[in-house]
Image (cartoon, coloured by chain):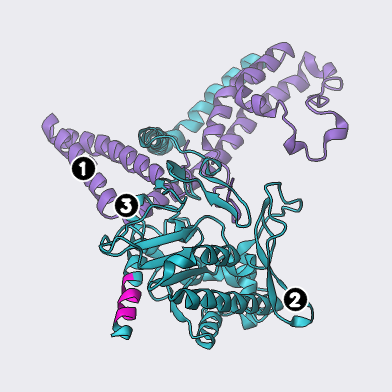
Chain colours: A cyan, B purple
Amino acid sequence: MRLLIGSIGAVFAALLTLPILLLALPFFLVGAGQRFGARIFERLEGDAVTWRDVLQYEPIIGWKPKPNIRARVQDLVGNRFVLSTGEDGWRVSGSGVSGKPEAFVFGDSFAFGFGVDDEVFFGNVLPDIGIKAIGTNGYNLVQELLLMERYAEAFHGGVVIWLVYHGNDLFENLVPNEGQYRMPFVRELKNSKGWEVVATHINPTPWPMASMREYNARLAEICCDTDLSKRAFSACDFLIERAMEVCDAAGARLVVCSVPDILQLDPAQIDRLVKLAPDPTSFDAGRPDRALEEICQRHRVGFVTLKGVLDPSCYIRGEVHWNAKGHRRVADLISSTLQARVDTAS
Amino acid sequence: MLVMPSQPRKSYLIGFTTSFGIVTAVILGSVAYWLTGASAAGGVVGLASILGLTLIGRVFPNAAWSLYEGWNALARGLAQLMHAWIVFVIFHVILRPVSLIRKVGNDGAAIGQLTMWQERRTLSSDSFYGQSEVPSALAAQKRFWLRDLVGWGLSSGNSWVICLAPFLFLLRLTTPASSNVVPENVYTLY
């Protein structure tokens, strides 16, 4: 009896559902086709390897890309891109007409060209200029400084461009880990006598307190007049001064290139940051830029910001990294920085 | 199925423009055929629709993304409406009559004894803390839900639940995929 009533009810229910089903039919067809098409496209593109296949543990620095690989990997939203590394493990880039790098770009995933194929990576779009990019995912400024010291001999006569990303660099200089991965950091000396680089804890075992990082909240805090902000820029002061000493000793010019997060650039997204600010009255999205510029002026280090160079259209949609257009603009900026050096010298 | 992923992945956009182009081509081609009576006209309009949309996707990716998001917003609204309507219909048109029959019919005596509650056997009771890390049969249950539903209906004398199956299937199609917000800390390193 219940089956009979249920069946009759189901027939009526089907009749009542039919109009809305017909209305939804184009949406069902497009949705199903979209999934099928996306799957075919991804299959044609080829499978991506994981980042574990690309990066490996490196003593002192923490981690580094593996040498001589060519791999397809995924960005943060799942787009696939192809990257190649050279014998030294860094992203392959053009050697320019002189056959040796004129610009050495240090940084994190931005310097590694995260999210774009080799041919549109900023190190490869201007064939006349030799650009050596040194850096990979998740690096902080301390790791980059240690690498600068390692490669200093090669800098003579060149320009060292240091990408300082506001999204995580400023905060992560102060902490010993990124998730489960150990990384060098700077520690304040007792009685505020300065800072020191700490790398004694670096080993391949997972960091025991791998809490989740709330990068946007930390960036919002740094954009306010807070203790974290003061500590972060004090650490930057120490790091930039040391980098300047390394470059001066090597006969190279250091230029700090400030890289704002897309949240700071996109008026449509800046509210997200403001909502996270612990002190909204002192919130200023331009604070990191101004603080870094002041530090650079004090140490007579070149300073450029990407704030006026990039706009939201230069970023991968839904991502924090640059797209091909962003890489092109950064390459042009590097070119003009090199040109400025030539003009100054002459 | 109705709602597309909100993650702005290139392959999703390509899948969408192709799929949208084909569906638009079929609809516009059919309209052109119906108006002119010439199959060639329908074919030309359909082909032009596909080419036009593909061109928009290639030359103006931002416009294509806007189309994707607009279409998805409509799909999401429709999915919510459909979901609410189907739940309303199956409750009032299937479940209520069946329940009424049980109350007035011979099954009334069994109501007090019959319960749908079942002891959970997938995990021991002391392992509830952090159970998301413990492999359980939940994933399998999610995958073979129709088989389980029909099996339960037949074994418990509730074969009428089979009538619910097509509607539950529709509900499943209208449920959007899980959240696609990119987490802030997503790097896997070595």
Using the image, tell me which numbered label, if any, was put on residue B113: none
As rendered, which of A2 and A65 lies closer to the eye? A65
- Element marked by disc 3: helix
Residue A80 showing in the rendered view: yes
The amino acid type of the residue labelled 3 equals Glu
Residue A269 visible in image: no
Amino acid at circle 2: Leu
Tell me if mark 2 has few (under 14), some (14-19) or many (20+) residues whose alpha carbon lies within 10 angstroms of its own: few
Camera-side mark, 3 or 1: 3
For the residue labelled by badge 1, is the local secondary structure a helix, a strand or a loop? helix
> Do discs 3 and 1 belong to a common subunit?
no
Q: CA distance from mark 3 to mark 1?
A: 28 Å
Q: Which residue is mark 2?
A: A189
Residue B89, percent from left and from top: 58, 33
- Give the numbered dot on residue A119: 3
Cβ atoms under marks 3 and 1 closer than 8 Å: no
Q: Quadrant of residue A10?
A: top right
Q: Residue at x 40, y 61 (%)?
A: A132
Evaluate whether label 2 is on the same chain as label 1. no
**What amino acid does circle 1 point to?**
Leu
Q: Which residue is the site of mark 1? A: B51
Relative height, residue B83 to residue A89 (above, below): above
In magenta, the rendered stretch is: A335-342
